[in-house]
Amino acid sequence: MSNLEKLREVMKKENIDYYIIPSSDSHQSEYVAEYFKGREFISGFTGSAGTLLVGLKEAYLWTDGRYFIQADKQLNGSGISLMKMRTPGYPTIEEWINDNLKINEVLGFDGRLFSVNQYEGYLKIANEKNFTINMEKDLLENVWNTRSELPKNKIFLHDEKYAGKSASEKLNEVRKNMAKKSADYFILSSLDDIAWLCNTRGNDIEFNPVALSYVIVGNNYSTLYIDSDKVDDITESKLKAEGFTVKGYDDIEDDVKVLTGTVILDPNKLNSKIFTALNKEVKIIREVNVTTNLKAIKNDVEIANWEVSQVRDGVAMVKFVKWLKENIGKQEITEISASDKLTAIRAMGDNYKGDSFGTIAGYKDHAAMMHYSATEESKYELKPEGMFLVDSGAQYLDGTTDITRTFILGPITEEEKRDYTLVLKGHIALASAKFLRGSTGINLDVLARRPLWNYGIDYKCGTGHGVGFFLNVHEGPQGIRPAGNSVVLEPGMILTNEPGVYKEGKHGIRTENTLIVEKDVVSEEFGEFYKFRTISYCPIDLDGINVEILSSEEKDWLNNYHKMVFEKLSPYLNEEEKEFLKHKTRAI
């Protein structure tokens, strides 16, 4: 409450009636450096997604279904009301502003933190309702005395033996796209796109190997805008050889002012401060960054590397499962110590560069919070009973992993066993899918939900997301969800398959593997069909399955999957570990 009241005092001084604090940074990143975690500082809500609207008398926080339970607890007593996104009875933030802001009132926000589309959406409402927008002020500068500095970690080059293409090759692909549209410039601000294009990686955001930067690609030159402290002489020389000049991070604000001709930009990624600095005479082409589409389809070198990293990760998972199963009830294991153990095992593997996100380790009812993060105050001690959900992954030079298993630690109820099996049925249905070229994730999402829907159960999130290659664990443009993504699935795309059940106060279950889209069959009469190939390798806990509600086809899928897991991983295990894995992958 004290942080909230301090912000209101500053709002009064600046004549701002309402102030919005999003979860993003200046690059519209999903996960951000500590410097940008203003929404968390003011509200106390620690989830990765959410938007805070602070008025002089009231305050509201919008977040999605992954965080309803968590947000409800963390906002309790804060004076901030929870607004549940995509839930009947709750307006969107735009609807609330449209209905509540009065003539001549002022809506404020930091323009760096809002995309072009977001800014123009609010501007449209402001023009219709006759209130004013002030996007020049970062009010947190006068409130947040302990704010971290912007990170200054060194970047490094991602070797072509992993990336499969040089930065200059990728730059040529971008220029071909520009030429098709007769464009003079392409402004790029999304950090994973920049890392992909330049074959650079950084350490500015925890778990995401990216660096705060911008790029402008011209027909005859390309500039990487980044803090000079982050680039050593050798890296700068190699970037220059690939076609990139290096300038200061903030220099882009002046450089965009002098651009002429036609400029391509992604209005969902470029921030409104840079956008409004463009010359008004510039012709603008708005489209999804071509780099986003190019990096979504992995090349043969990336796919081959990824397979190696997935096997390595699977070996680490088996070692962890063995440790967990053999020590539960014999020594004190908590949600935190189990998570730390898994990280330590992964860290012993080749090419390990850190976890790909904060491990979600939820025991019993904690697992009902989809993105639960244990603290010293909230942690549970694991017992030889119930279920333990672990969603984790790693960053390797040769790939990024993301896998979830729900482990059976001892006796579970019939309801838990049924729910566990229904999640598995949904997982198998999606993994087994064959689909016509042109299909989207929206077309396939229902396959994973149908077994749950038959019992009146659903989950308040998507079923799968794209995954980056030694980049962000959440990567677009592809995804598998009920709505909101019309991207066609193409061979070489990587996605997750993660249906689940989340019952507040009871239990949470999720089974997640990573999939790659591949060509299947071509028919002259019916067209080209695609399929998924699972590339995550770890046993699915057989102790949670009610075999009676699995079909013969589902049993075959599980047995074949477990046979593959044993064949892939056993060469890297000692005899004791092989015997453990053999039992965990036994046929049913």
Image (cartoon, rainbow, N blue to C red):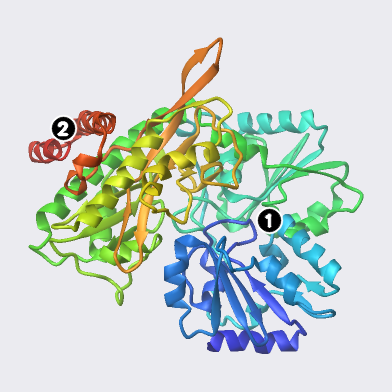
**Nearest to the observer: residue 212 or residue 478:** 478
Q: Check disc 2 and report the residue beneath it.
A: 587
Q: Residue at x 55, y 50 (%)?
A: 232
Tag 1 or tag 2, which sits nearer the N-term? 1
Q: Can residue 149 be seen in this snapshot?
A: no
Q: Is residue 57 above or below residue 187?
A: below
Whether 89 is drawn above or below 174: the answer is below
Q: Is residue 529 visible?
A: yes
- Mark 1: secondary structure: loop
Q: Quick one: SS at disc 2?
A: loop
Quarter of the picture containing the C terminus is top left
Q: Position of residue 439 (x, y in %)?
A: 55, 31
* Rendering coords of residue 11 (x, y %): 70, 84
Q: To which residue does mark 1 refer?
A: 248
Q: Residue at x 55, y 80 (%)?
A: 80
| Inter-mark Cα distance, 2 to 1 | 59 Å
From the viewer's side, name the closer residue of 547 and 471. 547
Q: Picture coordinates of residue 74 (x, y %)?
A: 44, 76
Q: Which numbered tag is attached to residue 188?
A: none
Q: Nearer the viewer, residue 506 or 161?
A: 506
Q: Amino acid at mark 1?
A: Gly
Crowding near the residue tagged with mark 2, few <14, some 14–19, many ≥20 C-alpha atoms within 10 Å? some
Residue shown at 28% from the left, 30% from the top? 557
Identified at 56% across, 55% down, the residue is 230
Measured from the top left, where is residue 49 in percent x and y?
53, 63
Residue type, numbered disc 2: Ala
Q: Residues within 10 Å of mark 1 (few under 14, many from 20)?
A: some
- Image position of 246 with respect to 9: above or below: above
Q: Quadrant of residue 412?
A: bottom left
Q: Can you name the residue that lies furthest to the right here?
A: 281
